[in-house]
Each structure stands twice: as C-alpha cells, then as structure tokens.
Image (cartoon, rainbow, N blue to C red):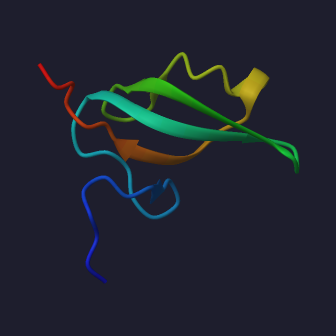
Amino acid sequence: MNRDEFDWNDMNEYVPEYRGHYLVAQKKGRDRCYRFVRFWEGDDWVNSKADEYGPVIYWMKMKPVPL
C-alpha cells in the first residue's frame, strides 16, 4: 500500500516516530468523535484529556504553515 505522509494513521498500527504536534482524532462512545492538535512526547500524548474526549484513535502529520 502506498501511504501518503499526510494520511490518517491508526494508533493500533502506527505511532508517531518523532516528538511534535499532530492532528488527532479522539472517540468517546459510539457517536462522538473529536479532532484536536495534540503533542506526542515520544511514548504518549501530552494532556490528551482522554477521560473527557476518549482515547486518540487516529493521528496524522500536520502540513507546514505556508509563510
């Protein structure tokens, strides 16, 4: 499978290689899905508020800001 570097990644299959900010999807219950920018510390998400929004289920690299 040819993966684009900005595709969604399933947390069960891949974790980010590098520390930094990523766009994530978090799911709470059956019908609630949220998208946030979260920081990956290298082994876990910093302050992901999983108790409020559910665990991070997908993540994607963010494109650079055009300057």
Query: Which residue is at a point 39% across and 46% down the rendered structure image?
Result: 60
- Image quarter of the N terminus: bottom left
Q: Quadrant of residue 32?
A: top right
Outermost residue toward the right in this view = 30
Q: Nearer the viewer, residue 52 or 8?
A: 8
Q: Position of residue 52 (x, y in %)?
A: 77, 21
The tally of labels here is: 0
The quarter in which the C terminus is drawn is top left
Left or right: where 55 falls relative to 8 = right
Toward which corner of the image does residue 40 lie, by quadrant?
top left
Q: Which residue occupies the extreme left position in the image?
A: 67
Can you say whether 32 is above or below 40 in the image?
below
Compared across the picture, whether 64 is left or right of 46 comes to left
**Residue shown at 30%/33% (left/top)?**
42
Which percent across, then down, holds residue 49? 65, 19
The percent position of residue 46, horizontal first and vertical second, equals 46, 19
Residue found 44% across the figure and 55% down from its top = 8
Q: Position of residue 33 (x, y in %)?
A: 73, 41
Question: Farthest front residue?
Answer: 67
